[in-house]
Image (spheres, rainbow, N blue to C red):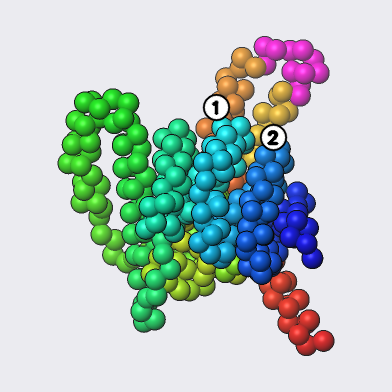
């Protein structure tokens, strides 16, 4: 199959997620004849990146990163040119925010993998320029996949996620502080000193709990940007079920039947409720249900007002009492409904995982 056809399939607008079999197929094809295929690939990607379709742009960025990692130093040199970096800078200022963030993420990955080569300095310069302009939207650095002790227990996993998340948040705060310092040097230097002095205090204020809170799920804080076929693709707000800890700062998780790796600093724990919290929540839910009678009475009065135009009924003490009682519990009732909806989403995710597992089993058996 021709290289141009492979690239077109890999960056097809119909692809909502990266197809790693296609991506690696492009890499293999380029490596067959790097001298001719590398310039063609860069030319094709330049065109794809300038198309208006966001899916094409996102798939092209993923392919770009894979080519940099799998097609040798000649590809790295072809990417690190003034003309190609110019295209990325131009697109960053003209595309949707989600694509802009991915451009910055790709540049970050590119310069981090090649930072020992001074001839590729233009990648770092381009990243710095975009980070300066759009840095508030950047995500934390993805940690390296370092092997860890297999004897680590659940408590170690909990601490690893919390520590990784805390370190990531501190780095993000430092980036924001540095950006502000460039705009107001003197004022921000003073604020930095104050920040450094007070930073440890929140940790000191933490009260030790009798028993560490447990959790088996985490919520994504950012959209992921997989750079490896084994990485899990997820979006901000997705709930991932933890399977095990694989690396020092990475875990294996399940999302909608798909299993993959996720970085700890991209998620936050969803702590399991204690028995006391479950009892309290159940009692409060039952209490809220008692307001149903008041709601029905209120609706009855409003129906009478609508039919008879007797607006004076809304000025009675009974109406005002009913209305106030209903309005008091409305926000809390909304929170409970949202919590139940989230639980429904978790159960749906569990169902999808079970269905995927049974489908795989049946395909193997039959």
Residue picked out by circle 1: 324
Q: Which residues are magenta?
A: 303-313
Residue picked out by circle 2: 296
Q: Which mark is residue 74?
A: none
Does the stretch in magenta take in 356? no
- Density class for disc 2 (Cα within 10 Å; few <14, some 14-19, many ≥20) is few
Q: Nearer the viewer, residue 228 or 5?
A: 5
Residue 120 x %, y %: 44, 51
Residue 323 x %, y %: 59, 26
Q: Which residue occupies 78% across, 58% down?
A: 5
167 relative position to 344: left or right: left
357 relative position to 244: left or right: right
Q: Is residue 41 visible?
A: yes
Residue 45 x %, y %: 66, 49
Q: Quadrant of residue 335?
A: top right
Query: Would you place residue 164 above or below residue 79 in this image?
Result: below
Does the stretch in magenta take in 304? yes
Q: Nearer the viewer, residue 171 or 19?
A: 19
Q: Nearer the viewer, residue 54 or 129?
A: 129
Q: Which residue occupies 74% across, 18% down?
A: 305
Secondary structure type for disc 2:
helix
Contact, CB < 8 Å: mark 1 with mark 2? no
């Amino acid at each position: 199959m021709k290289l141009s056809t492979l690239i077109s399939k890999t960056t097809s607008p119909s692809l909502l997620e990266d197809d790693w079999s296609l991506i690696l197929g492009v890499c293999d094809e380029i490596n067959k004849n790097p001298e001719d295929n590398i310039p063609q690939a860069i030319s094709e990607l330049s065109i794809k990146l300038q198309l208006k379709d966001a899916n094409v742009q996102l798939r092209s960025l993923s392919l770009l990163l894979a080519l940099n990692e799998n097609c040798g130093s000649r590809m790295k040199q072809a990417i690190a040119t003034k003309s190609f970096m110019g295209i990325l800078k131009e697109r960053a200022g003209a595309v949707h925010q989600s694509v802009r963030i991915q451009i910055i993420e790709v540049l970050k990955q590119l310069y981090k993998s090649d930072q020992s080569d001074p001839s590729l300095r233009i990648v770092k310069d381009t990243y710095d320029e975009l980070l300066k302009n759009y840095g508030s939207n950047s995500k934390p650095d993805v940690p390296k996949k370092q092997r860890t002790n297999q004897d680590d227990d659940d408590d170690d996993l909990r601490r690893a996620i919390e520590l990784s998340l805390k370190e990531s948040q501190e780095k993000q705060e430092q980036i924001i502080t540095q950006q502000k310092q460039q705009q107001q040097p003197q004022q921000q230097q003073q604020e930095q000193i104050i920040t450094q002095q007070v930073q440890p205090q929140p940790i000191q204020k933490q009260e030790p709990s009798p028993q560490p809170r447990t959790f088996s799920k985490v919520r994504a804080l950012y959209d992921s940007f997989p750079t490896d076929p084994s990485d899990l693709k997820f979006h901000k707000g997705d709930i991932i079920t933890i399977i095990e800890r694989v690396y020092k700062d990475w875990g294996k998780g399940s999302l909608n039947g798909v299993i993959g790796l996720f970085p700890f600093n991209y998620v936050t724990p969803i702590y399991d409720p204690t028995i006391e919290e479950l009892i309290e929540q159940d009692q409060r839910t039952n209490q809220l249900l008692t307001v149903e009678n008041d709601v029905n009475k209120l609706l009855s009065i409003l129906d009478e007002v609508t039919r008879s135009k007797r607006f004076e009924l809304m000025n009675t003490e009974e109406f005002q009492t009913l209305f106030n009682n209903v309005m008091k519990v409305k926000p809390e009732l909304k929170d409970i409904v949202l919590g139940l909806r989230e639980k429904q989403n978790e159960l749906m995710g569990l169902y999808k995982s079970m269905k995927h597992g049974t489908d795989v089993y049946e395909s193997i058996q039959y």
